[in-house]
């Protein structure tokens, strides 16, 4: 009877140790695989277990030491008990007991708990955090000793356990990948917007500005009649006003003041009081910085100047917003008219077309690190003024110049190959 009680006690202890080993194995996987962003979100909802988990993960070397000490203690003690059982009670070989224990540990204390923890890591991490925190405190002297030796070894490989926390910091490309793999968790249109915001740090004002030759404005030198024609046909709420050339900016006219402006222009009186002062920005200003500048200065449009102070184009707050939310339907219709698709997969357009618009519209990758328009790209590549009926290849794109107008490309065929 005493022997039966002893055997029952040994089996009960063995089962307890196997459960304890499974707990440590699952905790290790759960803690290391837990998404810290999800844990931070849970901690904001006043979940104490999530806060405990984050505190433990701040010192991964101590956490792992506590888990491994506990796990090894449970496995070694289980091995000793199995040895006693198979030799003293069943008269079997120790090797047989070791094989049986190894299989049992692998199934019930390693593979199963670790798989469960991998499926729901945050749940496993939060539930095990209380006991793990106690164990970290209990094993502190042993952890200090083992970590001191471990740090000396890590120094040989030029590694530091503290660097593990820096793995949580994601760069722009990694955040984009995270967005792409978010699936249905984030709606497609929102993923596209967030991806655009991430990509804006690489853009400057020059990338989205409207070139000077496309800027619609009022030349006061051309008189009252021409001003009426432009105001009645424009789709913009604000128009630049200049004298003879865009370089001689007088100011910005808001269409709500157009009636008074036309009256004064007809009477040949000064219109400066009705115009808003022109706002200038550098073409190399980062797009996100320019958005902040627009908002802080209560501005909506600005003239873009180069390093010599010469006006290169116009940029509006709407242009920046378009980079974030994408083109509106009306703009898409315009792009379809600007880039005429042919049956062979090529497009017809003119030299003033912006490379960025083509790339965004067709998902192409025509190089845009230098020139921003087709005219500029072709001229830069040829290092001379292009000629009609000329065909050239730039990277994986074929450009066939069909028509010229005053040394500028008026019609060009582009095909990706």
Image: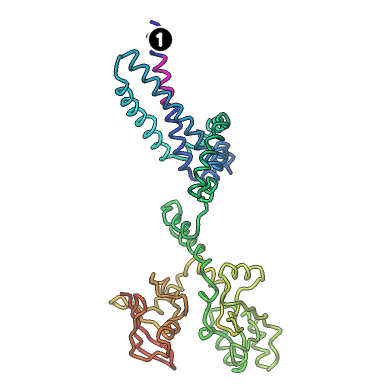
Residue 410 shown left or right of residue 239 in the figure = left
Q: Is residue 18 magenta?
A: yes
| Of the pair 28 and 269, the residue shown nearer to us | 28
The residue wearing badge 1 is 5
Q: Position of residue 212 (x, y in %)?
A: 54, 84
Q: Main secondary structure of the magenta part?
A: helix
Q: Residues within 10 Å of mark 1 (few under 14, many from 20)?
A: few
The foreground one among 18 and 275 is 18
Residue at x 56% of width, y 75% of height: 284
**Above or below for 390 versus 186:** below
* Residue shown at the point (40%, 36%) measured from the top left: 114
How many numbered marks appear? Answer: 1
Name the spot of residue 129 as percent of width and height, x first. Answer: 53, 34
Residue 355 pos. (x, y %): 44, 77
Residues drawn in magenta: 9-19
Horizontally, residue 103 falls left or right of residue 370, namely left
* Above or below 251: residue 128: above
Work out whether residue 301 or residue 198 is closer to the camera in this orientation and state it. Answer: 198
């Amino acid at each position: 009877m005493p022997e039966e009680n002893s055997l029952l006690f040994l089996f009960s202890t063995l089962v307890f140790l196997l459960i304890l080993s499974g707990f440590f194995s699952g905790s290790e996987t759960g803690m290391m695989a837990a998404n810290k962003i999800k844990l931070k979100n849970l901690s904001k909802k006043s979940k104490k277990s999530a806060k405990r988990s984050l505190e433990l993960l701040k010192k991964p070397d101590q956490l792992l030491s506590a888990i491994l000490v506990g796990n090894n203690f449970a496995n070694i003690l289980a091995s000793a008990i199995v040895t006693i059982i198979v030799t003293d009670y069943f008269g079997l070989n120790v090797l047989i007991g070791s094989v049986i224990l190894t299989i049992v540990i692998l199934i019930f204390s390693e593979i199963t708990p670790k798989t469960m923890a991998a499926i729901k890591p945050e749940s496993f991490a939060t539930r095990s955090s209380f006991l793990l925190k106690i164990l970290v405190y209990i094993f502190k002297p042993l952890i200090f000793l083992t970590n001191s030796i471990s740090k000396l070894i890590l120094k040989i490989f030029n590694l530091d356990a503290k660097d593990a926390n820096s793995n949580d910091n994601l760069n722009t490309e990694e955040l984009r990948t995270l967005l792409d793999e978010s699936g249905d968790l984030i709606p497609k249109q929102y993923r596209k917007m967030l991806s655009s915001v991430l990509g804006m740090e690489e853009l400057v004002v020059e990338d989205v500005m409207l070139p000077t030759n496309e800027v619609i404005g009022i030349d006061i030198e051309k008189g009252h009649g021409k001003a009426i024609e432009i105001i009645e046909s424009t789709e913009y709420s604000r128009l630049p006003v200049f004298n003879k050339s865009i370089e001689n900016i007088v100011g910005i006219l808001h269409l709500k003041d157009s009636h008074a402006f036309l009256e004064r222009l007809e009477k040949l009186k000064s219109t400066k009081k009705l115009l808003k002062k022109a706002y200038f920005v550098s073409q190399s200003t980062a797009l996100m910085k320019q958005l902040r500048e627009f908002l802080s200065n209560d501005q909506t449009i600005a003239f873009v100047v180069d390093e010599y102070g010469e006006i290169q184009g116009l940029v509006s707050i709407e242009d920046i917003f378009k980079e974030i939310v994408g083109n509106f339907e009306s703009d898409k219709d315009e792009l379809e008219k600007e880039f005429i698709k042919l049956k062979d997969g090529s497009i017809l357009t003119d030299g003033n077309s912006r490379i960025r618009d083509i790339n965004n519209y067709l998902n192409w990758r025509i190089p845009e690190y230098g020139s921003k328009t087709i005219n500029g790209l072709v001229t830069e590549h040829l290092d001379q003024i292009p000629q009609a009926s000329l065909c050239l290849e730039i990277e994986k794109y074929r450009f066939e110049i069909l028509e010229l107008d005053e040394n500028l490309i008026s019609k060009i065929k582009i095909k990706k190959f």
